[in-house]
Each structure stands twice: as C-alpha cells, then as structure tokens.
Amino acid sequence: MTPAKQVNGDGSIYFRTSDSRWVAALSLPAPDYGKPRRVVRSVPNVGTERQQKAAVKAKLIELRNERDLHGDIQTSALTVETWARAWLNGIASKEVRPKTAASYRTTVERYIIPSIGRKQIKKLTPDDVRNMVQFVTDRGLSTRSAALTYQVLSLILEAALREGKAQRNVCKLVNRPRTKKTELAVLTAADGMKVLQAVTGWPPPLAVDRLASRWWAALFTGARQGELLGLTWDRVDFNRNTIELSWQLQRLTWEHGCKTPCGFKRGNECPKRTLTAPADWEHHHLTGGLYLSRPKSEAGVRIVPLVSPLLEMMQMRQRASVLERNPHGLVWTQPSGAPIDPSRDNKAWHELLAMAGAPDARLHAARHTAASLLGSAGVPIETITKILGHSTYAMSREYMTVDYEQMAAAMTRAAAPMLEAQPAIRL
C-alpha cells in the first residue's frame, strides 16, 4: 500500500501487509561515516481501522517529539554495559576528576556490568536495581559499597535519560540502600600525645624521626594527607608563621591511549597512556602517577597558622632540607628527594601507631583528633571549620570526637557555678 504523503522530515505512516499492521516511520540523522537510519514503530492489529490509524499517527508524533527533544533516537537495543562504558569514556571522564572517574570505572567493571550489564537500558526494572545491590552484598562487601554502586548506576541512567536513550531513571523507583554506620578507631588527645612523643619526645629538643614534623602537622593542623604531602616550601611563610594549603598530592590512574589494543593489560603500561580530566581541573605533574592538584572546593584552600611547638619543628625541618635533594621543593620527601607516595605514607603511619602503643586508626583519624583538641580548647566551631577546610559546620561537628576525660572536665566546669552558689548540698 502506498505510504501516506508527509512533509519531508516529518516521517510517514503506512500499512504493512506482511503482518497486517499500521506502521510509523521516521528518518534520523546519519552518524559520522555511517548510513542514514530510520526508526520504525508499529501498532497492534486491535480495534477498528480508524482506531489503528489514530494510534499510529500518535506514535509518529511521539517519535517526532523524541527526535526533536534529544536530536536522535536509539534504534538498536542499547545494553547497560554498552552505555555504561560510553558514559565513562565520553561523559564522566570529562566532567569529574580523574580519581573520581577511576572509582566510577571500578564500580562499573566489578559490580554493574557483571550483575546487569546484559540488560537493555529501556527495559530495566526496579527488580534489576535490587538484584544489582544484592549482587554487591552477596560478595561480602559493605552496605556503603552497595550504596555507591546504586549511586553510580543512577548517574549512568540519568545521563541516558537526558540523551533520549532511556525513558526513565529506574533508580528513582528504588530507595537508596541504607548504610550501616561503621565504628572506626579514633585517637583521643592522650593517643595523639603518645604519637608525638614516639617521634620526638616532649617538649621536642631534637627530632628523632626524620619526618617527625609531618606527623606533628597532621595532629596540630588537621590537614589532609594529600595537603601535607603536597606542601611546598614556597607556601611556608616563617615571617607570618603560616602555611598555605592550596594543593594536594595525588596518585592518579593512567588510561589506555591506544585506538587498537596495545597488548598491555594496564593503562600505565600503554605506550600512548593518557589521563582524561575536565578542562578546568588545575594540576601539575611531578613524577610517574603523582600529581599536584587543586582542592575540590574553595573551602579547601586556606592559610593555617604555625604555632609553637609545631613552628619549631617546621624550622628544624627546613634547616635539614637544605642539605637534601629536593627537585620539587616539597617539605617532606623520601631520602632520595622523590615525593612520598600516599601508600608509603599510610604504611609509615600504622607503624608509628604500633610503636607508640596507640589504637590502629586510619590516618584520616588525625583530622578528628585535631578537631577534638580544638573543640576541647574552646575554639569556636566557625574557626574549627576554617582550619580543617570543611564546607559546613555540621561536618566539623562530626569530626569532634570527645573522650571521657574531656567530657568529665567539661561537666566539672559547667557544675562549678552551681557549687559556688550552693556550697552546702544535702544528700
């Protein structure tokens, strides 16, 4: 049967004799170096001919609207695996920082693709999302890992929705997995003192440990690991007794830059290895996979005062560094002058805790200790937030772990006025 006449570009409708169905057809933009495409949709052979014609016209209008809104229509069965990898390489890697993109890639390759990779984007159901979450937890991973996998899938589907490759983000129909709060080891003020004594003594006449000032800076300033490992001498001001925390040292993951398989499994082994990053990401390459990069937010850039005895420790470190090889001008380096790799720094921290007889806490716990020390000293929460580089007061409060000795001292101070007003209390 001859197709109904339509204006060029508006598509057409016709009756298909092979299965006795009315069909809507619409031409689509041709891809680069590809053939023109056409999307075809039919309506069920149900009801009167007039009803079928009305349904197929509505289908054609629906196709036009989808094409005009997104510029294209997916004509093949797009799977989660195909779109997830396209999203990683073409969208996420250009919008987020390399370490974030690397974490997304790990989540996609280890959890999303193995569990629901073969599913079609347009046919995903809430059960598929729940099955993916179950896939993660069945492997003994934490609820936090399950929640992160859910979050990454939601980002993938939201991008597919924007580009017309999905009709909905099915993750929005499923509640985000609840995360179990993990009890992490913390360092009290007394534990912090043990660590400081282990590397230098109290008060410090001479530094026993070559990197003693590095640990003092962690516990006195609450600075992040990357901020201290990336600190350079040109940002240490002994005239004003301050340090400027405006860069951080990071180890980033190289990607394959080859268009055809180079034969190497890892990206850092590829002869044409590359690093994809947003255009506005400020970074400076040091050596290997180690970079200096800017903090994520403006709150992360700050000037922190150097107070005694940390000030004296930093001055000792500067005098010692004059005799050392230091091509990058870093405050703390390996004996060879190379930057200290974060993994090496973490190992040294745990060895130090064992030597000091302190709980085996993460290095990040030093920030909690600094916040608690500042809080117990009566420092206002606004000031603590600025020192730690937090974006909100609430975040700083979460870092302020108060131990029993601090609580007892605080309660004693609070009770003092009442005891003075009523010296004779009858029991």
Image: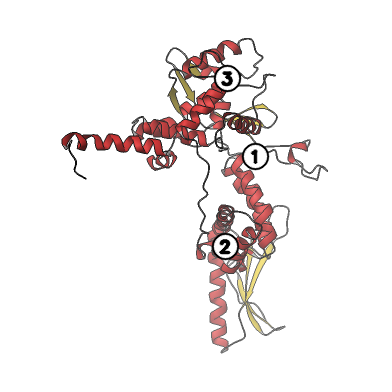
Q: In terms of secondary structure, where does tag 1 sit?
A: loop
Decide: few, some or many residues near mark 1? Use Cα within 10 Å; few <14, some 14-19, many ≥20: some
Judging by the rendered image, the residue that carries numbered circle 2 is 67
Q: Disc 3 vs disc 1: which is toward the camera?
A: 3
Q: Residue furthest front?
A: 427
Residue shown at 56%/74% (left/top)? 59
* As drawn, 278 above or below 338: below
Image coordinates for residue 278, horizontal then vertical, percent: 58, 39
User: What is the number of the mark on residue 331?
Assistant: 3
Q: Disc 2 vs disc 3: which is toward the camera?
A: 3
Q: How many marks?
A: 3
**Residue 340 relative to residue 158: left or right:** right
Decide: few, some or many residues near mark 2? Use Cα within 10 Å; few <14, some 14-19, many ≥20: some
**Residue 267 relative to residue 339: left or right:** right
* Residues at marks 1 and 2, CA–CA distance in whole angstroms: 30 Å
Residue shown at 65%/34% (left/top)? 343
Image coordinates for residue 105, horizontal then vertical, percent: 65, 48
Image coordinates for residue 217, horizontal then vertical, percent: 51, 24
Which of 375/300 is in front? Answer: 375
Q: Amino acid at mark 1?
A: Thr
Q: In terms of secondary structure, where does tag 2 sit?
A: helix
Judging by the rendered image, the residue that carries numbered circle 1 is 276
Q: Are marks 2 and 3 in contact (CB under 8 Å)?
A: no
Decide: few, some or many residues near mark 3? Use Cα within 10 Å; few <14, some 14-19, many ≥20: many
Q: Amino acid at mark 3?
A: Val
Image coordinates for residue 252, horizontal then vertical, percent: 65, 36
* Residues at marks 3 and 1, CA–CA distance in whole angstroms: 29 Å
Q: Are marks 1 and 2 in contact (CB under 8 Å)?
A: no
Residue 9 in view, yes or no? no
Q: Are marks 3 and 1 in contact (CB under 8 Å)?
A: no
